[in-house]
Amino acid sequence: MTSFVKCLENFLKAVKWSSKDLKENEYKIEFSKRISDISEIECLLKHDYQEIFNTLRTAFNITLSNDKSLQRPISIKNGFNLDNIKEYIKDVFEPFGYVNVKFTLDKIDFYSNHSELSISIQECNFYPFLYSCNLLEWLSSFNISELEKEVFKDGKQTIFLALDLQNTVSNKFTMLAGNNVTSELIDTFTKEYSTREHELLMKWRFKQVNWLEGTKWISPDHFFMDFESIKGEKLLKSYFLKNAVNLIISFISNYIYTENNETLCIINGNKRIPIRLLDEESYNQNEVEYLFEIYKWAYTGYNSDKLSILRNLITIIICEDCGVNSYKLLLSKSKEIYKTVVNNFEMYLKENVEQYFNVRQKILDLIQNESNEISNQIGNTVNNLNRNLLTFLGTVFTFIIGFVQNTNINLLFFLLIAFISYVVIYSVYYLSFSKIKIKYIKDYSKKDIERLRKNIFDSDLPKFEDTQIYEYIKTFNKFWYSSIVVNAVLIVITILAFIHLNVIIEAFSIIEIPK
């Protein structure tokens, strides 16, 4: 990265341009000037561009133009012809006395095609800057919603490069890279990146915090880093820590709303505490680190009891110092809050451990009892299916016996009607009743399990879809539908026999049956 900076600085020095005049955004570095001094033009023409094009290649371009001339603008770029440039200057400068110069350095072109980082940055949001102050100015132009849409986008990791920084810091989602960054550092940063856990965290946040305009992807994890290794960049450090703090407070609040273009976070606990999000000039790394630990602790395990205890504790501690700004107080007492909430939760678990396991056992018993009930229904369904098949075979056998003994045909008609009636009544009554009963068991058990498991750690109990009840219901449904199909087939066969009874009897009469 030093070659990039050195090459640019050497060029600016040679043509006597100041780096302070450069305009920089996330894509380009630009500089525009009207030159009326022939000596400055000569500096441009005499400069040796070989080093520039060896390093910057197609990313470097100087466009010469004159708004009064009819000639088209001409560019000093990779592969340019010096004689054509001199001829253009002669034709434009002498009659009009000036030339418009626009210097452009396409950073995206350089880092995407000609830099050693080209391959490593392909899967990231990458924003290179020559100076950290320009990076800060650009970032500060976005609010939190715009940052999510325009900067931290597409669920990708994000790299901010500022070549005047001496060191590189990062977290799981964001890298703030200095001039010591290498492809190896970026490869380590992007290795084994996964969004699954963060998606679960954001889904849980949606349930715990009423924040209609809240972020859908970015969290405190995107901004908090250990900035101790970056010296002299107080404003850039404060920018990242400010966003980390404001998102942490939002994530642990009950609800958030906007009032007079200011964000107000409400924490309900022992009392109702409003916290207005601020933009401090500086943030203490140690205070923010403890606040970040509070957030990580509250969101680990996705246990709503943790958030409830934390909210109660915050409202108690902050209310003890009435009149002091809640935002600053929360930061200054972050260490105290962290240690207290962890100890209180441990005590809470110890006091409620017996109740905890009782609830857990209650759910396990419920699963077992309901599973047994469904298992019985499965057995009954199979037994009734077998009974219907045996009844059908019995009917056929009785029909044959009746025919052999020359039984009245009306009795045979009655026999078929009786069988059809039996199967229809069975299908309508028993199968309908069993289906309704199983649905009731499913709804009741699912509702009870979800209600009780709110007080149980997710890792201790399976979701309803993973329980034995759910598996048994699927098995019951298979046998239930099989019964419907078999009964329907039996009814159809019996009805056909009923309709064509005379034909069947006539066919039997042809066959000699020993009497």
Image: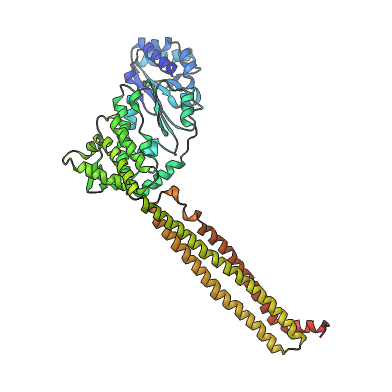
Which corner quadrant of the image does residue 11 belong to?
top left
Which corner quadrant of the image does residue 30 belong to?
top left
Q: Is residue 266 visible?
A: no
Which corner quadrant of the image does residue 504 belong to?
bottom right
Q: Position of residue 278 (x, y in %)?
A: 25, 37
The quadrant of the rendering that contains the N terminus is top left
Q: Residue at x 43, y 9 (%)?
A: 46
Which residue is nearer to you in this view: 285 or 378? Answer: 378
Q: Compared to 17, does 366 lie above or below? A: below
Q: Residue at x 54, y 66 (%)?
A: 376
The quadrant of the rendering that contains the C terminus is bottom right
Q: Is residue 47 visible?
A: yes
Say left or right for 261 vs 71: left
Q: Residue furthest left?
A: 323
Q: What colour scheme has been applied to the protein in the rendered image?
A: rainbow
Q: Compared to 303, does 159 lie above or below? A: above
Q: Position of residue 400 (x, y in %)?
A: 74, 82
Q: Residue at x 29, y 25 (%)?
A: 234
Which residue is nearer to you in this view: 471 or 234? Answer: 471
Q: Compared to 514, does 383 lie above or below? A: above
Which residue is nearer to you in this view: 278 or 398? Answer: 398
Say left or right for 148 vs 313: right
Q: Position of residue 299 (x, y in %)?
A: 37, 43
Q: Position of residue 157 (x, y in %)?
A: 44, 34
